[in-house]
Image: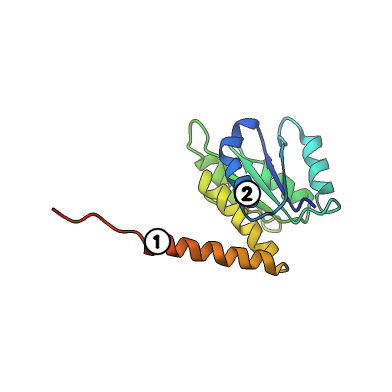
Amino acid sequence: MIEVGIVMGSNSDWEVMQHAARMLKHFGVACETRVVSAHRTPDLLFQYAEQAAPRGLKAIIAGAGGAAHLPGMLAAKTHVPVLGVPVPSKYLRGEDSLLSIVQMPKGIPVATFAIGEAGAANAALFAVAMLATTRSELAEKLVAFRQEQERTVLAMTLPEIE
């Protein structure tokens, strides 16, 4: 059963958003990926958002660049949690996207993550953490993932000063 939707405004956003899909796959969380443009396919956006809960989605990770209306518009049309990922834009490096996503009006929340690949991966990890509150096997995988991160850092060394 598909639990997480990953949507983006254009296929050019896939370079960033694939990091969310890869992270979910790492944890064995079923997801779907779609291009849903807030500006070019608003009817599709409304349909996707309205059908998200009845189809069983537990979270939607939405990546958008530029004006970045996709996450907010999805959040306005569904009660499924929306996790926003600002995609770097050509001229403003994604800062415009970040501000568009994070500045949602009171009452329509979008969890907003870092610009780019780190944000996409962290949005997926956040979705995993949400799902892990009711799935012990997922919680165990998340704990193991964090322990591996700790081991990696503890094994790091720095070069000697000459």
Q: Which one is nearer the viewer's eye here, 35 or 27?
A: 27
Q: Which residue is tagged 1? A: 153
User: Are the residues flagged by discs 2 and 1 in contact, CB closer than 8 Å?
Assistant: no
Q: Amino acid at mark 2?
A: Gly
Point 69% across, 54% down: residue: 29
Nearest the viewer among 149 and 126 is: 149
Badge 2 is on which residue?
Answer: 84
Does 114 sit left or right of 51 as displayed?
Answer: left
Residue in view at x 80 percent, y 49 percent = 52
Task: State the residue at coordinates (72%, 36%).
Answer: 36
Give percent across and percent down for residue 91: 48, 31
Percent of width and height locating residue 133: 69, 68
What secondary structure is found at the residue carrying circle 1? helix
Q: Which mark is residue 32?
A: none
Q: Which one is in front in this view, the residue at disc 2 or the one at disc 1?
A: 1
In this view of the protein, can residue 153 be seen by the observer?
A: yes
Residue 161, placed above or below residue 45: below
Quarter of image, res 53: bottom right
Callout 1: few (<14), some (14-19), or many (20+) C-alpha neighbours within 10 Å? few
Q: Quadrant of residue 152?
A: bottom left
- Image check: 96 left or right of 28? left
Q: Is residue 147 left or right of residue 5?
A: left
Residue flagged by tag 1: what amino acid is it?
Answer: Val
Q: Whole-percent x and y of residue 62?
A: 66, 45
**Circle 2 SS class:** strand
